[in-house]
């Protein structure tokens, strides 16, 4: 059994090693985009079961964003929703024989964390301006600036480590049990791994949303006024 | 455990591309579909609201028209009632007037009938009185009464205008002397008294007529000198009748 911490390089494109995680990611991208194209084919005003199901998903995501941030969900919908779908699909990719979830690799989780870190900056500047974003580090007062800067890095790092640890440990445990006890014994652990994958995807997406919302809220001119708009 | 930065960057790029692609092919179309349905439902609701408003307006119009009809009906009923009352009053007044006229006419008729009845009663009474008187006077047809009537005859002849008395005396056909009975009077005395009163001696024919009751009358073809109870009673009856 190979160590789950090691990446298997299939081939090189110039200096870039193409690992299994990258190939799996490409496969997931193809599946998700293909599924999206199929599911959104010919949307009508009178929805069928297919359209009703995907609209239900979008509506649930919008409700989640609205309840978390209090803002309109449109700017965050694609980022948070895609992040959740990718992580969920990547986590559940372990169900396919011979496929290792990309989120069980450091590079993928680090990339996700890096994207969240950048998105916090992006949405913070877009929502509150550069000065507002910088002001968000001074919340609730100036003395907190070093700690807030440190927190902005550590909280993303914690997301990275949490996702990596959970997924990698699941794959690791299942690999050990499968190598020791045959085919049927790992099934309960795989079911648990499904739940873990769902929960981790949800946690990662919600935390990204919370970080973005907190940054935008703290960046407002009057930071004491909540960013959350009242529902109408 | 090492971190492959090339792999990290490639995975970051992959995720960003995936986010961009899903945004284009999934999130935006589905959100647009939801927004379009909400817009369509809002439009339908607005349309339904407008239709409801129009229906309410039509309902208000219909209600107003119904109220107008009711008011018009009430007005027509009031007019008809007033006309009926006026017609009733007119008919009652006409009937009352006609009844009053009829009552007056009936009263007049009753008065007339009553007067006629009274007149008839009076006439009947007169007739009955005259009959009674005639019966009573018929019992007085004695010589004394006849002598009195002879005197009255002589006096009547004397009262005649001379021309009439001369024409009576010169009557060629003679004079009928009518008496109630031949028993109570002497014809010779009568004849002598008449000749004396006329101053001439025309032919005298004695005739008996019980209808005279009592008395002596002279009759020619063109002249009658009445002098009897019957003549008196007839005159009384005429007088009473004319008086009624």
Image (tube, rainbow, N blue to C red):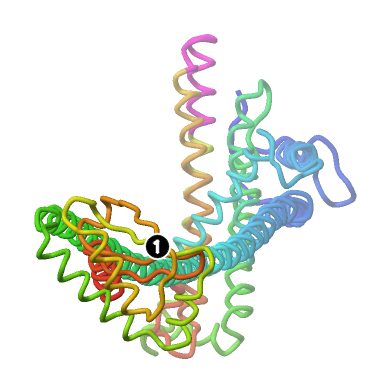
Residue A154 can be seen, yes or no: no
Residues shaded magenta: A170-187
Q: In the image, A39: left or right of A152?
A: right
Tell me: residue B159, above or below residue A184: below
Tell me: residue A32, above or below residue B102: above
Q: Residues within 10 Å of mark 1 (few under 14, many from 20)?
A: some
Q: Position of residue B242 (x, y in %)?
A: 31, 74
**Which of the pair A230/B22 is nearer the observer?**
A230
Type of secondary structure dominating the magenta stretch: helix
**Which of the pair B31/B95 is nearer the observer?**
B95
**Which of the pair B146/B187 is nearer the observer?**
B187
User: Badge 1 is on which residue?
Assistant: B204
* Residue at 46% from the left image edge and 65% from the top image edge: B220
Circle 1 marks a residue in which chain? B
* Residue at 46% from the left image edge and 75% from the top image edge: B168
The quadrant in which the N terminus of chain A is found is top right
């Amino acid at each position: 059994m190979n160590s789950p911490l090691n990446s298997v390089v299939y081939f090189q494109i110039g200096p870039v090693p193409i690992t299994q995680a990258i190939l799996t990611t490409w496969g997931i991208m193809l599946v998700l985009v293909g599924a999206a194209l199929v599911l959104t084919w010919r949307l009508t005003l009178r929805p069928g079961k297919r359209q009703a199901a995907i609209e239900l998903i979008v509506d649930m995501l919008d409700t989640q964003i609205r309840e978390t941030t209090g803002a309109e969900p449109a700017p965050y919908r694609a980022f948070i929703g895609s992040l959740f779908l990718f992580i969920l699909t990547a986590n559940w990719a372990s169900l396919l024989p011979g496929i290792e979830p990309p989120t069980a690799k450091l590079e993928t989780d680090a990339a996700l964390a890096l994207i969240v870190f950048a998105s916090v900056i992006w949405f913070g500047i877009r929502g509150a301006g550069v000065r507002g974003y910088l002001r968000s580090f001074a919340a609730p007062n100036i003395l907190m600036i070093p700690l807030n800067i440190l927190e902005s890095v550590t909280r993303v790092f914690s997301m990275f480590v949490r996702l990596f640890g959970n997924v990698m440990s699941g794959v690791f445990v299942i690999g050990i049990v499968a190598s020791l006890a045959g085919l049927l014994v790992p099934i309960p652990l795989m079911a648990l791994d499904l739940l873990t994958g769902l929960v981790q995807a949800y946690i990662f997406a919600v935390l990204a949303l919370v970080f973005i919302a907190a940054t935008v809220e703290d960046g407002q001119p009057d930071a004491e006024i909540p960013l959350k708009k009242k529902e109408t | 455990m090492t971190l492959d930065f090339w792999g990290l960057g490639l995975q970051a790029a992959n995720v960003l591309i995936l986010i961009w692609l899903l945004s284009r092919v999934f999130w935006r179309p589905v959100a647009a579909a939801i927004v379009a349905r909400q817009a369509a439902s809002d439009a339908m609701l607005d349309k339904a609201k407008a239709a409801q408003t129009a229906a309410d307006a039509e309902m208000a119009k219909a209600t107003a028209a119904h109220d107008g009809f009711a008011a018009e009906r009430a007005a027509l009923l009031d007019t008809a009632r007033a006309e009926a009352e006026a017609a009733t009053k007119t008919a009652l007044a006409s009937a009352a007037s006609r009844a009053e006229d009829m009552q007056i006419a009936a009263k007049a008729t009753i008065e007339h009938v009553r007067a006629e009845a009274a007149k008839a009663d009076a006439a009947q009474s007169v007739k009955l009185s005259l009959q009674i008187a005639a019966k009573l006077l018929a019992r007085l047809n004695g010589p004394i009464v006849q002598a009195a009537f002879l005197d009255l005859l002589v006096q009547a002849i004397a009262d005649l205008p001379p021309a009439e008395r001369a024409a009576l005396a010169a009557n060629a056909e003679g004079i009928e002397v009518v008496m109630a009975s031949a028993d109570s009077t002497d014809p010779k005395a009568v004849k002598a008294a008449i000749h004396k009163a006329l101053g001439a001696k025309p032919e005298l024919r004695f005739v008996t007529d019980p209808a005279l009751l009592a008395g002596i009358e002279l009759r020619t073809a063109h002249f009658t000198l009445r002098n009897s109870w019957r003549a008196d009673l007839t005159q009384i009856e005429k007088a009473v009748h004319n008086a009624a």
